[in-house]
Image: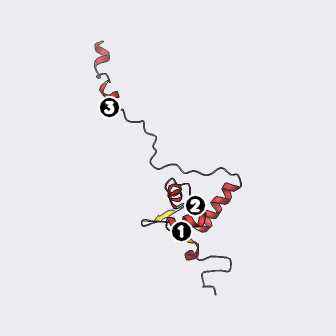
């Protein structure tokens, strides 16, 4: 039987949702450690509910279909990478000239 919100072609959210790295790993056929790495690097479409990693079966299937059709993967920008100039190292700070040194020479 179908509920009022579910039609014949739809799958309920409970049936579509994978909870935890183990469930995601068994669905895609990978080792749990490898799956955790792929999730941490954002190579797989997933998210967190609290501290539990969750993924949609539908989204994972679409993701792998895109990969096997030859489309380049859509890699997300890593959130920790910024466009700031890198900080000077300790050595660069130690050997830097004082501000008034150019005028004194």
- Image position of 31 with respect to 74: above or below: below
Q: Residue at x 49, y 49 (%)?
A: 78
Quadrant where the C terminus sits is: top left
Question: Which label was assigned to residue 90?
Answer: 3
- Who comes first in sequence, dot 1 or dot 2? 1
Instruction: Tell me the SS state at disc 1.
Output: helix
Q: Residue at x 62, y 51 (%)?
A: 73
Relative to residue 68, is residue 25 drawn left or right? left
Quarter of the image for residue 25 reads bottom right
C-alpha distance separating marks 3 and 1: 46 Å
Question: Which label was assigned to residue 55?
Answer: none
Instruction: Tell me the SS state at disc 2.
Output: loop
- Who comes first in sequence, dot 3 or dot 1? 1
- The answer to the question of whether label 2 and label 3 lie on touching residues, with beta carbons closer than 8 A, is no
In x, y percent, where is residue 74? Answer: 60, 52
C-alpha distance separating marks 1 and 2: 10 Å
Quarter of the image for residue 95 reads top left
In x, y percent, where is residue 33? Answer: 50, 58
Kindly give the residue lying farthest to the bottom in the view shown. Answer: 1
Relative to residue 92, is residue 42 drawn left or right? right
Question: Which label was assigned to residue 23?
Answer: 1
Question: Which label was assigned to residue 30?
Answer: 2
- Who comes first in sequence, dot 2 or dot 3? 2
């Amino acid at each position: 039987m179908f509920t009022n919100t579910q039609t014949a072609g739809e799958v309920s959210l409970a049936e579509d949702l994978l909870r935890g790295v183990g469930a995601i790993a068994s669905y895609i056929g990978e080792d749990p450690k490898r799956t955790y790495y792929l999730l941490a690097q954002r190579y797989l479409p997933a998210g967190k509910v609290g501290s539990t990693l969750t993924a949609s079966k539908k989204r994972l299937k679409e993701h792998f279909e895109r990969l096997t059709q030859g489309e380049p993967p859509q890699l997300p920008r890593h959130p920790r990478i910024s466009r700031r100039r890198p900080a000077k190292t300790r050595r660069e700070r130690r050997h830097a000239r004082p501000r008034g040194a150019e005028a004194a020479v």
